[in-house]
Amino acid sequence: MTDVTGASADVLHTLFHSDQGGHEQVVLCQDRASGLKAVIAIHSTALGPALGGTRFYPYASEEEAVADALNLSRGMSYKNAMAGLDHGGGKAVIIGDPEQIKSEALLLAYGRFVASLGGRYVTACDVGTYVSDMDVVARECRWTTGRSPENGGAGDSSVLTAFGVFQGMRASAQHLWGDPTLRGRKIGIAGVGKVGHQLVRHLLDDGAEIVITDVREDAVRRILDEHPEGVTAVADTEALIRTEGLDIYAPCALGGALNDDSVPVLTAKIVCGAANNQLAHPGVEKDLADRGILYAPDYVVNAGGVIQVADELHGFDFERCKAKAAKIFDTTLAIFARAKRDGIPPAAAADRIAEQRMAEARRR
Ligand SMILES: NC(=O)c1ccc[n+]([C@@H]2O[C@H](COP(=O)([O-])OP(=O)(O)OC[C@H]3O[C@@H](n4cnc5c(N)ncnc54)[C@H](O)[C@@H]3O)[C@@H](O)[C@H]2O)c1
């Protein structure tokens, strides 16, 4: 028998004692027949049932998977609180390479585990899971969102995610330049996948000039073909962030875009993009503020997707969702105002406002 005492102790310590902990419930799930191993973490149900996606990923260890579930579910509490949703934060991770082990039987087994929580956790897509997977999970579990329109879902969430990021940019422009329009502004987008692609359209409609980059040549080509005017491409993110005269930088690829290497050389005055976890480590938000760069917190401006999936539970209505996502404009402005009042970076102000909302709900 393998001795796992040390590893389990680490997990228990994280859960019960560290700053990353304070979770209400963590469930370990196993179905040997299908190879399912999953962790469902419920950080908070103060505002309502925990909502967050399912990440399917080949973690290097089970401890790493638990740590990711704890971190991600905590992040969802803040995101849902700032989006004004009546949902707490939760997240699930399925351990393994989706290319190798994802099967109908595994997804159905996973659905049964989510269902066993009786609605305390509502699931959705994340890295490694797709709308078609949620359609399968939903056969066993009614607390499943991110389904296809044919199965009562809202489909691709990138449409409203991009719309929300656009609102965050308009609010940033309002705060910094006294006018929400992006007309004539030069905006750099790193990553023109599902969200970046939609964002280009909003920005061109508003009269912005756009610079893009992506590691996938086909993604860049598609944008340049669709928009022969108003968009130029540069070789990589390194070049993009150093572009002369850049007004806004929109990280729309992977996390960690704002780090010790990138922040000192940014030419933009505003950072506002869709990518999750843009700040590589604590303290980067202060480095941005010290350089006079306005940072629109990622989890606030990219909440359009979660607003969309939350709406599925009430019978999806696109216009109702769009109206909610439009409020990201006011929320972002309120964060900048709070940051100014308290003399703290916007990322810290967002955390304070979210914590306040959760604390008020707990007292009720
Ligand atoms: N889709 C949503 O609804 C949603 C919601 C909230 C947050 N997000 C976040 O927004 C980001 C983009 O999501 P998406 O759905 O558009 O994903 P996507 O996979 O469709 O697009 C990401 C794009 O980034 C490119 N890319 C990867 N590494 C890069 C690099 N080093 N430099 C430049 N480009 C690179 C990829 O080639 C791809 O085209 C992700 O961080 C995601 O977690 C998405």
Image: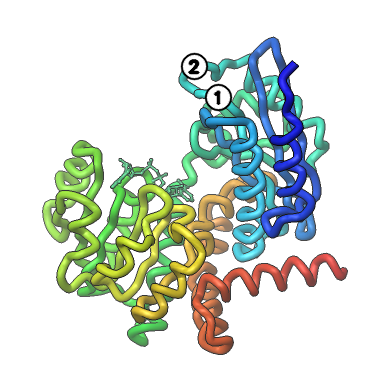
Quick one: label 2, few (<14), some, or many (20+) residues within 10 Å?
A: few
Direction from residue 53 to residue 225 in the image, left or right: left
Q: Which residue is mark 1?
A: 96
Considering only vertical position in the picture, is 343 above or below 60?
Answer: below
Question: Residue 344: where, in percent of width, then height?
Answer: 53, 81
Label 2 amino acid?
Answer: Gln
Q: Are marks 1 and 2 in contact (CB under 8 Å)?
A: yes
Direction from residue 329 to residue 85 in the image, left or right: right
Question: Residue 248: where, in percent of width, then height?
Answer: 29, 69
Write the residue at 50% across / 80% down.
336
| Residue 44 visible at all | no
Secondary element under disc 1, as helix, strand or loop, is loop
Write the residue at 67% across / 55% down.
20
32 and 89: which is toward the camera: 32
Q: CA distance from mark 1 to mark 2?
A: 8 Å
Question: Residue 207: where, in percent of width, then height?
Answer: 23, 69
